[in-house]
Image (cartoon, rainbow, N blue to C red):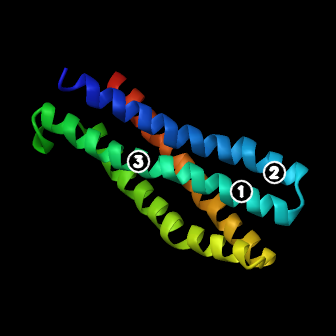
Amino acid sequence: MSYVIPLFVHLLCATFWVGGMATMHFAVRPAAVATLEPPFRLRMMTATLRRFFVGVDASVTLLFLSGVGMIMATGGFRSVHWRVEAMMSIAIVMAAIYVYIRASVFRALRRAVEESAWPKAASLLNTVRQLVGMNLVLGVVVFGVAIIGRAG
């Protein structure tokens, strides 16, 4: 049981984060682009991201806590399989990208939207899109490492 509960939390949080990025990237943003004029789209996307990021904040925190918990439950860092080291390394990169988005780009995006600086807001939202796209690819790689690495 000391491994199963952290594993469940870990998978739930990873699914929320990576699945949420996929939803935002492939469904929400394209729908907003197709149906809303830039000021409305930028306001809607900023509000949507603000809500999503609250969940991502919790997910990233719980991912690291549950990951370390599972590592400790199986003998510590000295006994981990290569795939655990790979997942942890990629997760650190993903978290750094997310922190940059959250603390810098998104903060500037919110200010630009509040000031109705639409070209600046659009550029910042595009930066968020590109960084989320990178994190989405990395997240899929982590899932692949977890599954393929376990089978190998």
Which comes sooner in the sequence, label 2 or label 1?
Answer: 2
| In this rendering, position of residue 13 left or right of residue 137 | left
Image mark for residue 15: none
Q: Kindly state the secondary structure of the residue where label 3 is placed.
A: helix
- Whether residue 140 is visible, yes or no, is no
Rounded to the nearest angstrom, the CA distance separating label 1 from label 3 is 20 Å
Query: Is residue 35 placed above or below 117 in the rendered structure?
Result: above
Which comes sooner in the sequence, label 1 or label 3?
Answer: 1
Residue wearing tag 1: 45
Q: Residue at 63% of width from left, 42% of height from top?
A: 22
Which comes sooner in the sequence, label 3 or label 2?
Answer: 2
Label 3 environment density (alpha carbons within 10 Å; few <14, some 14–19, many ≥20): few
Query: Is residue 118 placed above or below 136 in the rendered structure?
Result: below
| x and y, in percent, of residue 16 in the image | 50, 38
| In this rendering, position of residue 2 left or right of residue 23 | left
| x and y, in percent, of residue 114 in the image | 70, 74
Image mark for residue 58: 3
Q: Nearer the viewer, residue 68 or 109?
A: 109
Label 1 environment density (alpha carbons within 10 Å; few <14, some 14–19, many ≥20): some
Q: Kindly state the secondary structure of the residue where label 2 is placed.
A: helix
Q: Amino acid at mark 3?
A: Ala
Rounded to the nearest angstrom, the CA distance separating label 2 from label 1 is 8 Å
Residue wearing tag 2: 32
Q: Residue at 68% of width from left, 48% of height from top?
A: 25
